[in-house]
Image: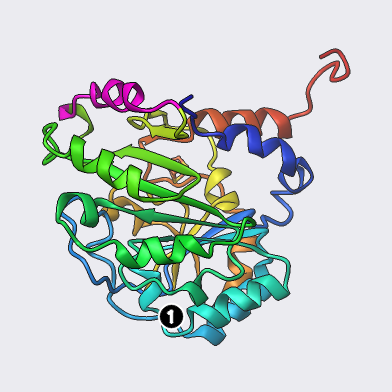
Amino acid sequence: MPQYQSFPVKLCYHVDDILKIKEISRPINLAIVPCGRCNLNCEFCVSKKMQRIDLPLNKILHFLDVTKPKSVDITGGEPTLYKDLIPLIKYMNDHHIDAGMITNGIALKPEMIKGLMWIRISVNSYIDKGYSDAHLIEIEKNLSTKITYGFNYVYNINYKGTNFNKIIDFIKRHKFDYFRISLDINHTDELNVDFEKDILSFKDDVRFIFRRKIEFGPRPDECFIGHLKPNMESDGIVYRCVLESEELMHSIPIGDIDHPEKILQYQGMNHACTRCHNYEQNKIIKELLENQEHKNFI
Ligand code: SF4
């Protein structure tokens, strides 16, 4: 069966931190781009304008020490190019921070997987461009059952149905926990989601996840999600939101790698936002923080 984003429900596990957010806004799930470089050049990539530099490991570790996130997405750029990837994951393991990684898998080695709770491999280069996936098949032979190992295919403007058989071939060759299909966020209005029907009719024993078109709500009164789920880019700047345009995102950072304590101070609304893809979550949190009348009558 298809599965959908569970992020709003997961907020319920962190009510204690949410209730204190205006005193100390600890990030629950921090995304870090340790390395802005990439070994591919995908047309639909939203990270192309990232600074192509690496963050110093000691600064990342200090940042984690001060801000104490519960989990970290290691993302890119391409994180497998980061020379200190393995010590970074080890540090998170030693400090009880859950670690997950998003990679294109091209330079992935088995030792980079150790200590991750999940890994998601972007597979467009293998499916659209014919890159060899033989090394992934080798990795899959010795995968620990503790790790969730998934794939993501970006349904993009070049798809036009021609790659369907290649996706099926890929699925048949690999051992994985789920296959996610997301829409190229630059072209969501032009893409035909009939693709979903094709895929579901192919196999019902594969766990497919469909990441649909992002729905925006109006500008909220306050931006709590930006503190609970911030993003540190390869320039060391921490932003509230990865999905807004770069111009907008870059105008309102909430901190940087050299001043980790700053992100612990609640900073209210991101004034550059005119709409919000986390509107519902921001609204729920705002209502939770207000003193609800007769709160035991649920
Ligand atoms: S769109 Fe703006 S208000 Fe909404 S979560 Fe992102 S930064 Fe916050």
Question: Which residue is the site of mark 1?
Answer: 55
Label 1 sits on a secondary structure element that is loop
Q: Main secondary structure of the magenta part?
A: helix
Q: Is residue 164 something that shows in the picture?
A: yes
Give the left or right position of residue 285, taking residue 202 as reference: right
Which image quadrant: the C terminus?
Answer: top right
In the rendered picture of this protein, how many numbered marks are placed on residues?
1
Taking the spot 74% from the left edge, 54% from the top edge, the residue there is 23
* Image height of 214 relative to 33, above or below: above
* Image height of 99 relative to 52, above or below: above
- Does the magenta portion include 29? no
Q: Tell me where the magenta segment starts and ends, as one range.
A: 190-204
Q: Nearer the viewer, residue 76 or 161?
A: 161
* Image height of 145 relative to 112, above or below: above
In the image, residue 132 lies at what x, y percent? 23, 63
Specify the amino acid type for callout 1. Leu
In the image, residue 245 lies at what x, y percent? 28, 48
Q: Is residue 74 something that shows in the picture?
A: no
Crowding at mark 1 (Cα within 10 Å: few <14, some 14-19, many 20+): many
In the image, residue 210 lies at what x, y percent? 39, 32
Give the left or right position of residue 1, taking residue 43 as reference: right
Taking the spot 40% from the left edge, 79% from the top edge, the residue there is 82
Taking the spot 68% from the left edge, 71% from the top edge, the residue there is 93
